[in-house]
Image (tube, helix red, strand yellow):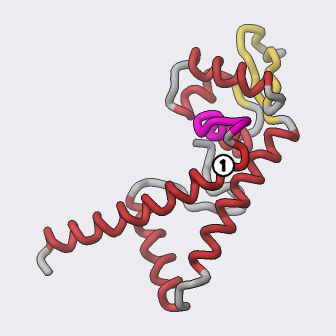
Amino acid sequence: MGEQEDLSAVTSAVLTGSRLLVAIAARSLTAVEDRITLPQFRMLVVLAGKGQTKLVTLAERLDVNPSTAMRMADRLASSGFIVREVNPRNRRETLISLTTDGLRIVEEVTGRRRDEIAAIVSRLSADQRLALVSAMTAFTEAGGEPPASASHPLGWPEA
């Protein structure tokens, strides 16, 4: 197999795998989809990983405009998933943090996702699991994604 065919085969395999992971992510949100959207969930995940955060910083980490982040925060606050406070050190800034209900949503969705991935991985042989760990580690390192660790149990760093 030539280099170009090899690259094409790997790209196709990764695209297929990513389609599976997107489907798992979408299914993991179905139990809460009546309460939260995917972008709102992403905001909660960032807050779960980062802790109390300024609205402007949150917008940067989500790669959205501050006004978009504010609208998302308005909806999440009205649903009881986040709390907004004025920064006591700079009254022009808004600080946002998760509520217990917001953290529960993140843990519930992430747990469902982890369980489904674990069920799929359990069907692989020991050699396939090792190969998958090696391949996924190389892939994420090449893409600049920090590894999931104890400091990022949700599988996401700040954003």
Task: Determine whether 2 is above or below 81 in the image.
Answer: below
The residue that mark 1 highlights is 30
**Which of 13 and 57 lies nearest the eye of the viewer?**
13
Q: Is residue 140 left or right of residue 70?
A: left
Residue at the location (61% across, 82% down)?
A: 122
Q: Extreme right residue here?
A: 100
Would residue 151 appear left or right of 12 to someone viewing this image? right
Can you tell which quarter of the image residue 114 is in? bottom right
Q: Position of residue 48 (x, y in %)?
A: 74, 43
Q: Is residue 140 above or below residue 81?
A: below
Q: Nearer the viewer, residue 98 or 77?
A: 77
Task: Name the spot of residue 78 as percent of width and height, x first.
Answer: 79, 22
Q: Quadrant of residue 44?
A: top right
- The quarter of the displayed image where residue 77 is located: top right
Residue appearing at x 58%, y 15% in the figure: 67
Q: From the viewer's side, name the closer residue of 130 and 34.
A: 34
Number of marks in the image? 1
Amino acid type, label 1: Thr
Segment tinted magenta in the rendering: 34-43
Dominant secondary structure of the residues highlighted in magenta in the image: helix
> Is disc 1 surrounded by few (<14), some (14 to 19) or many (20+) residues within 10 Å?
few
Give how far across and how far down residue 95 sits, in percent.
76, 23
Say which quadrant the N terminus sits in: bottom left
- Residue at 65% x, 60% y: name it: 113
Rendered residue at 74%/27% (across/down) = 76
**Mark 1 falls on what kind of element?**
helix
Does 41 appear in magenta?
yes
Q: Pick the quarter of the image with the C terminus.
A: top right
